[in-house]
Image (cartoon, rainbow, N blue to C red):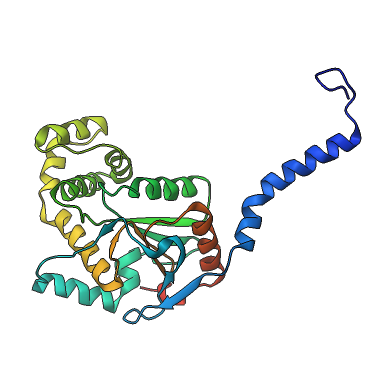
Amino acid sequence: MIHPEGRPIRRRDLLIAATAVGVVIALPRVRRVLQPPFEFQPLRRISGFRRLSGGSMSGAAAVFVGVDTVTEDQQRLRDNVAKNPCLAVFGPEGWSDDRVPIAVFTDYNCPYCPILSDLVIGLEAEGVPIRPIWHDLPVLGPRSEAAALAAIAAGQQDAYLPVHEYLMRTVLRPGPGPLVRIAETFGLDSEQFQKDVKSRPVAQKIEQSEAIAAVFGLIGTPATIVGRTVVVGDIDRDTLLRLIEIERSEPFDGCSQN
């Protein structure tokens, strides 16, 4: 074999090149193996669930202040979450197959939330065995709440994820005009979409996410519940993949039936 510069390529050169490629491919897995083991702390109020402690997961992008007054309706929601946390967090599907459920709690004005959103969406597209469940937790004020309502309303017409991705990159301005543009862009029934944004069922989805956050102690966004493990704050790709592997290797019967 001849090198592009005209000199022969020796077998030794080929072996060195092949070894280098192998090392590059293996590096992510080696990094995960060499990283220190995770430290988990059990959640006091939620049997079977735990919290990941230490490392880059110690902080959050925005402090979750919750509702100012816990109404009777909100307290009832919290009680229901505590009684059946798997149903509240992961929905009726629970953890019924070989995919690890990942509940993602985001705010559309949270600086790190778009990164986490892209990471989770990308991993699912790559075939990583996960099932994302999205929870809108607007902790940063009225604009965050307006964006969350719009995304959830789009979900009433099976367009949650594309609108979610759009709003992660776009500031939703006040007024009906931006909602009309969203409807046109994503092929929604505009009139129905605008009605749903203001509807009680859509608002209740946010209240449900607030109740879950209160019960699980999610102090801010972003936050994730990966299988049985709560992570508050940012999480990088390698760490998330390690956590998914652990959750797959330790089936959680507590979420298999709802």
Image position, residue 172 (x, y; %): 19, 38
Numbered label tally: 0
Q: Visible in this render: residue 228?
A: no
Closer to us: 190 or 9: 9
Closer to us: 185 or 23: 23
Image position, residue 149 (x, y; %): 18, 49
> From the image, which quarter does the C terminus lie in?
bottom left
| Residue found farthest to the top | 6
> From the image, which quarter does the N terminus lie in?
top right
| Quarter of the image where one finds residue 233 | bottom left
Q: Visible in this render: residue 154?
A: yes
- Please name the residue shown 84% across and 35% down the image: 14
Left or right of residue 24: residue 190: left
Image position, residue 217 (x, y; %): 29, 71
Image position, residue 11 (x, y; %): 90, 35
- Please name the residue shown 74% across and 45% down the image: 22
| Quarter of the image where one finds residue 86 | bottom left
| Quarter of the image where one finds residue 45 | bottom left
